[in-house]
Amino acid sequence: MKLLANDGIDPLGKELLEKAGFTVDTNHIPQDELAVKLQAYDAITVRSATKVRKDLIDACPNLRLIGRGGVGMDNIDVEYAKSKGIAVVNTPAASSQSVAELVFAHLYNGVRFLYDANRKMPVEGDTNFAGLKKAYAKGVELKGKTLGVIGFGRIGQETAKVALGVGMNVIASDFVAIPKALTLTLSGGISVDVPVKQVSTDELIKQADFISLHVPFLDKPVLGTAEFALMKNGVGIVNASRGGTIDELALIEALNNGTVSFAGLDVFDSEPTPRKEILTHPRVSLTPHIGAATNEAQERIGEELANIIIGYFKG
Ligand code: NAD
C-alpha cells in the first residue's frame, strides 16, 4: 500500500503507518505534476496546501483514500471524490486546543497592545521615548469580561474553556443547541462543570466585550456592517476560523470609527497575503493561519490520521 503525504506528516504518524505495512512517501510533489505522479499511489494525505480537485481525482483512478490532516476540507472536492468511491477522512478534534490557545494569544496581545509596543520600542541611544508608556497605559484585563463565542463546536468549546479558566463570562451562539455546561479539567485531576449560556448571534454581538469566531465559511460573512453596528464600542474581535467569515471592509470601517478596538486575525479573505488596509492597520494583529501549528497538535493530527487510514485499509 503506497501513501503520499504531500504536505508532510508528523514522524509519529509516519511510524505508525510504516509499522502497519504502508510505504509512506513524504517528498512533496508540485501541484502541476500530481496528475501524473499520484497515479502510483493508493492514498494521499494533505494539509491545506495541496488541492485535490475533480481533475486530479479523474486522473488517478487507483486512488482509494484522501486524508486531510486538520479540519477544513475546502481544498478537496469531497462529494466528487466520494461519488467515485474514494474515502475522504480528516482529523477534526486534534487541533482544537491549539486554535483555542492562539485565540488567547491574540486576545492578550490586543488588550495589552503587544504587537504595536514591540514595533515601537526605542533602540539603544534613542532619547525620544517620552509618552511611550502612556501610549500603552490603557490596557484592560480579560478577567470579568464577556467573551462571545460564535460557533460552539469543537474549537468554540475549547476556547470557552480557556475563557472560563481565566475568569471570563462566556456567551455562545450556534445554529444547534449547545451543552448547558462545560467540564473544565484543572491540574491535579480536579474537574468542575461551568454553565454556559446560549444566546442569538445578535444578542451575543450586543453583549460581548470580545468576540471570537469559530464557524465554517458558508455563503456569506457572519460579521458585516449590520453586525458591527450592534456591537459595544471598543469590542475586540478574533478570527481563527476561515477567511470570508468577516466582511473585511466592514471590519476596517469599524476599526476606524472606534467600534472595534483591535482585531486579531489568523485567517483572511486573500490568504496568504492580507489586503493592505488589514496588513498595515495599527490595531490589527496578524498570524499566517497557524492555529493548528503546534508540535502537540501536529503530533495528534499525524497519529489520528494514521490510525484512521490503518483502520480503513486494514480494519
Ligand atoms: P465544528 O464543526 O466543530 O463547529 C462549528 C460550529 O459552528 C457548529 O456547531 C455549527 O453549527 C456552527 N455554526 C456554523 N455557522 C454558524 C453561524 N453562522 N452562526 C453560529 N454558529 C454557526 O468546527 P470546528 O472544528 O470547531 O472548527 C471551526 C472553524 O475553525 C472551521 O472553520 C475550521 O475550518 C476552522 N479551523 C481553523 C484552524 C486554524 O488554523 N486557524 C484550525 C482548525 C480549524
Image: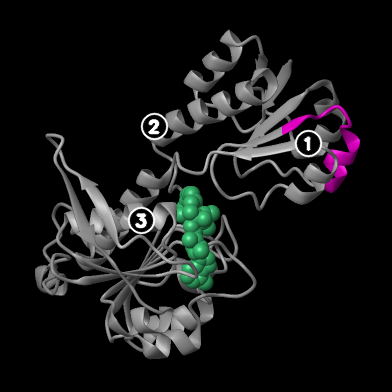
Residue range highlighted in magenta = 54-65
Q: Mark 3 and mark 2 in contact (Cβ < 8 Å)?
A: no
* Residue at figure coordinates x 53%, y 77% from the top left: 247
Give the mark nearer the N terminus: 1 vs 3.
Answer: 1
CA distance for labels 2 and 1: 30 Å
| Circle 1 residue | 86
The secondary element bearing badge 1 is classed as loop
**Mark 3: secondary structure:** helix
Looking at the rendered structure, the kind of residue marked 2 is: Asn
Q: Is residue 240 above or below residue 245?
A: above
Instruction: Give the amino acid type for the residue marked by disc 3 in the picture.
Output: Gln
Residue 263 drawn in magenta: no
**x and y percentages locating residue 164 in the rendered image:** 20, 58
Horizontal and vertical percent position of residue 169: 20, 68
The amino acid marked with disc number 1 is Ile
- Is residue 271 or residue 135 the one in the foreground? 271
Q: Is residue 107 left or right of residue 224?
A: left
Q: Are marks 2 and 1 in contact (CB under 8 Å)?
A: no
**Residue labelled with disc 2:** 295
Residue 128 falls in which quadrant of the image?
bottom left
Q: Is residue 29 above or below residue 57?
A: above
- Does mark 3's beta carbon lie closer than 8 Å to ligand 1? yes
For residue 18, which quarter of the picture?
top right
Sooner in the amino-acid sequence: mark 2 or mark 1 = 1
Q: Is residue 60 magenta?
A: yes
User: Is 27 on the left-hand or right-hand side of 235?
Assistant: right
What's the residue at 44%, 57% (across, down)? 153
The mark found on residue 5 in the picture is none
* Residue position for label 3: 157
Quarter the N terminus occupies? top right
- Front position among marks 2 and 3: 3
| Left or right position of 283 against 44 | left
